[in-house]
Structures are given as C-alpha cells and as structure tokens.
Amino acid sequence: MLRLQKRPVTLKDIAEKAGVSIMAVSTVLNSSKSTVGVSASTRERILEIAQELEYRPNAFARSLRMKRIGTIGLVHDEGLLRTDDPFIRELFNGINDVLASNDLDLLIYCGVDVHDRSTILSRLLGNKIDGLLILPTEGGASWINKLADTHVPIVVVSEAVQGLPSVSADDTRGARLIAEYLFSRGHRHVLYRRSSTLSSMDEARYQEFQSVADQSGCRITATRANDILDSVTAEEERLVLNRSDDIPVTAVACWRDQSADRMLNYCLHQQIAVPGELAITGFDGAGKHIHVSGRQITTVKANWKEVGQEAARLIVSLTKHQSGNTKGDLVQANLLIGDTT
C-alpha cells in the first residue's frame, strides 16, 4: 500500500492555530528583523504550537533569506586528499571540529592541478559556498591569486600568500629550534635539504636556519631535491660520504619529515651510523615521527589540528563580517627530540 508523505508544517499553519500573523511567527521562529511586536506570552504560545505540530524550518529557504548557504569550501590542489597523511588528517580534524560546532557543512574540492582549472574556479565562485579554505601544495599557490578579488572570504592554510589571510605553523621558530639544537651539539657543517619546489614555507625555514648558522659561525650547504619524493641526489651523496673535507658534514637538516625519511633510508643502505656519523632532523611531525626501521626522527612538532581550528575560526568570522586577523596567524611549533641526533 502506497503511503503518502505528510505535508510539511508551514508558518501559516502555526499562525492560524495561534491566532496571530505569519510575520509574528516568522519573527519568533526565524529570529527575523521585524517591526511587529511580540509579547512574551504570544512568543511562548507560538513556540509551544510549533513543537506540537513538529515544525521543521526549511534550511534552504532560510539560507536564501540570510544570503548564506551554510557551507565552507576546502580546496586542495592535489588530485587526492590523503587522510593517511598525519599532516592532512590533523588539519582536516581541526577544520571539521570548528565547522561542525558552528553548524556549517564542509565541501571539499581536489585536483586543481589535474582538472581544468577554469572549471574548478568557476565552481568555487558559483555562490555555492560562504567562504573558502585553500590548502595548497608546496609551490602550488600561484593560481590562488586569481581568487583574491572575489566576493568570497578566503583563508589560506599552511602557506602564506601575499594579500590573503593565512594560518600556519610558526616555521621560523621551528627552524631556529632545530638549528640551535644541532649547533649546541657541536655540529659545524650542516647539509640543509630544501624542497623540490619554491614555497613560502620552505623559504622561511631555510632563511631562519641560515641566520642562526651565521650567528653561530657555522657552515651550511644547501641542496634542493630533484623530485617531490625528496630522493637523495648525487650531490648529497658526495657531501655525506666526503670525510676528507676540512669541516665535513656531520648533520643533515631536512625541510620536512619525508625528506628525513629518505636520508635515513640512504644512511641505513650505506651503513652510515645515525647519529654516530651523521645526525638527521625533520620538520612537521604531527606526532612522534617513526621511520619504518623503528627509529624516531628528531623533528619539529607542529600542531596541525590547531592550525586547522584557527583557520576555520577565521573563515567563520570573515563570513559573518566580523573582525579578524586578516594578516594571518601563526601556531607555535616545538622541538621533538628523537634518536637520530
């Protein structure tokens, strides 16, 4: 037997039963601005009848009235959002916690680097979102500037893009902590492994590390990875294996944990004692970073969940036209000592 769906209860139904105008009901149930005055007793009667009739507000219609959709977009310019990556997982959890507490949905876009960019950008700006969080890959922030002049509030996460508010970990503090730690342990020549691509994150870390080295009278040799996997290059092999230098390399500071993983793999294969012959540090540990060999890498622990929370709070305040730090926020990073130094 076919059962007919019950007709949704409307404001008119409540108004008729309460003996008041539809405007009065709307004022009470939708918190809408109105010149209609509603007494405390009338307000209570409207609420009781709404509950009795099991009134459910039309969220879509309300969003049209409020000119807000109740959705925040998150765009990641890689083809996949890898939730098995601690960095991505912690960021996502932080963002989702804040948006859920504000009764906001999260709409995820991936693959700006592999799909037609104009199509993706038109979707982002098609009035389907109230605000936009952007999580760019290293060096992938150039296309973001095309969004800077739009009406949609934007917050960049983990990177800094000129002219847009951003939230990230304190990269300079983290780099300074690593540098001071290595130099305090007697290392005088450090190989600094940079990213394969240009990014504000990589540049900030390297410049701070170099500054501490200059102040300490220590030597830095910087290299840049040839690929996104941070594979060890021939130049890096030569620097690590060359023990005849007047001041040989005794430590490798890597711009991220994956880079440290690759260097530790190489050392284990070459039977180079870590940290006896060569110390290794990473960056960005979303917890204790453990290599597949069981070694705990000395790294900088950035609280990426907190970064996600701060970014979400900022985008929520911007969508409500509230004041916020539009220049950007930094979340503190701390040194996490492992057994590779």
Image: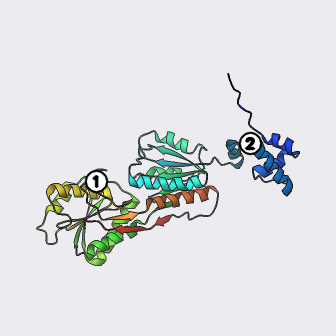
Residue 316 locus on image (x, y percent) = 59, 56
Colour basis? rainbow
Label 2 or label 1, whichever comes before in sequence order: 2
From this view, report whether residue 324 is shown above or below residue 180.
above
Question: Which residue in the protein does label 1 denote?
Answer: 230
Residues at marks 2 and 1 touching, judged by CB atoms closer than 8 Å:
no
With 21 as the anchor, is 221 left or right in this view? left
Side of 221 where 107 appears, left or right: right
* Quadrant of res 194: bottom left
Extreme residue toward the right, this view: 19
Q: Name the residue tied to disc 2.
A: 54
Which amino acid, by three-letter code, is at mark 2? Glu
Looking at the image, which residue sits at the far front? 1
Q: Is residue 9 left or right of residue 229?
A: right
Residue 78 shows up from this direction: yes
Q: Quadrant of the C terminus?
A: bottom left
Relative to 57, say whether 217 is above or below.
below
Q: Residues within 10 Å of mark 2 (few under 14, many from 20)?
A: few
Residue 10: quadrant of the picture: top right
Image disc number at residue 75: none
Q: Position of residue 290 (x, y in %)?
A: 30, 58
Badge 1 density bin: few <14, some 14–19, many ≥20, Cα 10 Å = many
Q: Nearer the viewer, residue 142 or 202?
A: 202
Disc 1 on helix, strand or loop?
Answer: loop
- Can you see residue 224? no
Quadrant where the N terminus lies? top right
Q: CA distance from mark 2 to mark 1?
A: 59 Å
The answer to which quarter of the image holds residue 282 is bottom left
**Picture residue at 32% right of the left edge, 69% below the top:** 178
Q: Residue at x 55, y 56 (%)?
A: 98
